[in-house]
Image: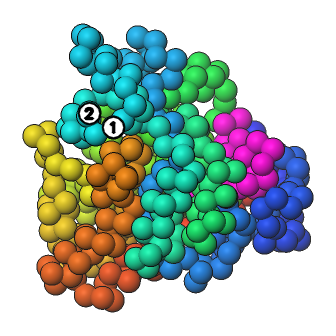
Amino acid sequence: MRRIHWLALVVGCAALLWSTVPAGSQAPAASGPIPDMTGKVLTVNGPINPDQLGTTITHEHVFIDFTVPDETPERWAATGRTKPVGATAVGVYNAPLGLDILGAVSLGAVNRDNWLLLDETVAIREVMEFKERGGGTIVDTTSIGLKRDPLALRRVASATGLNIVMGASWYRKGWFDDSEIERRSVESLADEIVRDVTVGVGETGIRSGIIGEVGTVGNPLVPLEAKIISESGRASRLTGAAVTLHTSAALKEQPKILDLLAQEGADLRRVIVGHSNALATDIAFMKQLLDRGVYIQFDLLGRSPTVRTRITDTDVAKGIVELIKAGYNDRILLSQDVCTKVQLKSFGGSGYSFVVEQFIPYLKRLGVTDAQVNTIMVENPRRALTFVAPVPGEVAS
């Protein structure tokens, strides 16, 4: 049996606390009891009732710094990106993103400015495209390593009237100090996530409402990623928050990832397997994951296809129809994962509104009913984002 965690000792007192502390109010100290958020959704403007969410996109980035940290050769390699070489490529990389290079960047040319979503005026204009088409909530899954900005998220939420749910935990190897993660214990890392959820990020008092995106790209999974998965699962159990996964190349590693989460006591019905577009044609494997209780999230929608595109939005739509026929309609989530400028409407992309503006109408043409769409876009996100009771104590080893 592991040592009893300090957080677990006080969770039993949580029912004595308020469950709806507005963000910015005096939050519990890091060493105090964990507030019981059961039945609430936690946004950057504080807890709300689940029926206030409305149509929800569950994996986006309103603000992000997706540039290669430090830009050292080691960091380029660790992030899996190729540093540009040659005068033309370097020139494109260093140039501000404009019409002169937009076509090249849209087709894959590397451009540093493309990886920066920092302008609040642009952000407000872009997310309003979603709201004006019936959108209610955006889940911003910008986690540690991607320069999340709680204060900016709150300003956008307040300016637009949208609900914004902010993420916690660490992104993936290469985007943060790997040595720090290796040095710290699972318990210490989980403590930091729990603090983000219960107290707030840094000194902002703005609290995370979901754990993730939690990055995994190793194929097979590497020890550092396994540690991040474990601490995220532990924090989910201790807070009642859901976990959302960045899967990338590790899609076939999902059974192992789910095992790690379960070993820390996470409820797999509270786990979102993101970036699952690549699985859209593998119905049998998706069913294998779904039968463990998870949500399958198709969140790479609306991207311009290139010669490198293997699974199209049409493939995803057909896969969703098959999952609905098989009875899994209540475990599907949709989003676009906007994380670069070329995805914004301001730069010729499909923006944050593609799912509601283009993809949902296409699903309906394939026979998906209004009721089934409501399940996917309203009921499923509401269920996933609503906190459940925290579970104190330790998981038997």
Quadrant housing the C terminus: top right
Q: Quadrant of residue 302?
A: bottom left
Which type of secondary structure does the marked residue at label 2 adopt?
A: helix
Q: Are marks 1 and 2 in contact (CB under 8 Å)?
A: yes
Looking at this view, name the residue that lies furthest to the left.
307
Q: Is residue 346 left or right of residue 40?
A: left
Compared to residue 210, the image places residue 358 above or below, namely: below
Compared to residue 395, the image places residue 65 above or below, namely: above
In this figure, which residue is indicated by the disc labeled 1? 98
Magenta-colored span? 188-210
Q: Nearer the viewer, residue 195 or 232?
A: 195
Query: Disc 1 residue type?
Result: Gly
Query: Disc 2 residue type?
Result: Ile
Q: Is residue 202 magenta?
A: yes
x, y percentage for residue 323? 23, 71
Give the number of the disc on residue 144: none
Identify the colour scheme used.
rainbow
The residue at 30%/88% (across/down) is 370
In this figure, which residue is indicated by the disc labeled 2? 101
Whether residue 214 is visible, yes or no, is: no
